[in-house]
Image: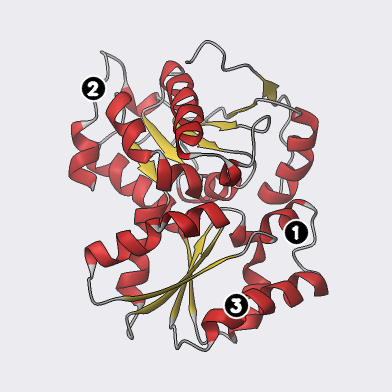
Amino acid sequence: MIDQLHEAINFKDKDKSLLPIGVFDSGLGGLTVVKQLLLHLPNEAIIYFGDTARLPYGTKSILTVRKFSLQIARFLQDQDVKIIVVACNTASSLALNVIKENIAVPVLGVIEPGVSAALRVSKSKSIGVIGTTATILSGAYEKALQKLDPTVNVNSVACPLFVPLVEEGWEQSDVAEMIARKYLDQIINTEIDTLILGCTHYPILKDVLHKVVNHRVIIIDSSIETAHQVCSILQSEKIQRPKKSKPTHKFYVSDRPQRFEEIAERFLGESLPNVKQISLDDYQ
């Protein structure tokens, strides 16, 4: 995968190390990836776009998800980013290849990093995946897992109520635990030893999920694994930002910046002043 990303690098004569990392999601979930990038790469500048006017992507057609994702990727490319992280599982499963074919910078999704980590730690080769309805129906995780290891057994469950629970701030509630137990009952008894969080909202629910699986199942947080992969790519290409430089982060949305700021503060643990609303009409 890294070799393919290397081939995509085609920058003009610029100091690549100083260019920002581009990250996008259909809304807010991708902020869990941003949080891990800030933790693991504190010197890197980040430009984030949340498509809050058109979420959720999970209910959209494949063609629509590809159209929206390519628009955002073109916007980020225009911001001179050095890599684009598709921090949306739906877009990663349905639009990643289209983006790679049309964008001149490396593009990384959130599926392959999580899959690689799960296969490394699973001893039984019985792996569970939870995600949005669209991600689970796409079969993207199952295909990626079985491509790397045809012997792996995959059990997938759609958990559509998890996203609204997180965005309402109910991740520590009894309701969240009850719903999690209802969903996970379908796979806990299948002897999985590893569980992939196939939606970038789900890391917010890790405490509840650990309760439900009784700590006997290893939980794979794709946002952490994606940050590790970005680290590897930047190191391999020698385009890490200098350690003593002070990065400036920018956050853009397509609608309702105030609502985004409110929820983002819970996701990141800090306020995000000056979130800008922009239109993507010029990126058809």
Name the mark nearer the viewer: 1 or 3.
3
Q: Which residue is mark 3?
A: 184
Q: Which residue is mark 1?
A: 165
Q: Position of residue 239 (x, y in %)?
A: 30, 33
Q: Is residue 128 left or right of 253 when viewed as pictured? A: left
* Mark 3 and mark 2: Cα distance apart in space: 44 Å
User: Helix, strand or loop at disc 3?
Assistant: helix
Occupied quadrant, residue 240: top left
Tell me the kind of residue under disc 1.
Leu
* Mark 1 and mark 3: Cα distance apart in space: 16 Å
Q: Position of residue 252 (x, y in %)?
A: 62, 26
Q: Position of residue 193 (x, y in %)?
A: 43, 83
Above or below, comparing residue 42 to residue 74 in the picture: below
Residue placed at 36% from the left, 28% from the top? 82
Q: Residues within 10 Å of mark 1 (few under 14, many from 20)?
A: many
Occupied quadrant, residue 16: top left
Are the two marked residues, 3 and 2, in contact with CB atoms closer than 8 angstroms? no
Tell me the kind of residue under disc 2.
Asn
Residue placed at 37% from the left, 39% from the top? 96
Residue 114 visible from this viewpoint: no
Tell me the kind of residue under disc 3.
Leu
Above or below, comparing residue 179 to residue 217 in the picture: above
**Which comes sooner in the sequence, label 2 or label 1?**
2
* Mark 2 and mark 1: Cα distance apart in space: 41 Å
**Which comes sooner in the sequence, label 1 or label 3?**
1
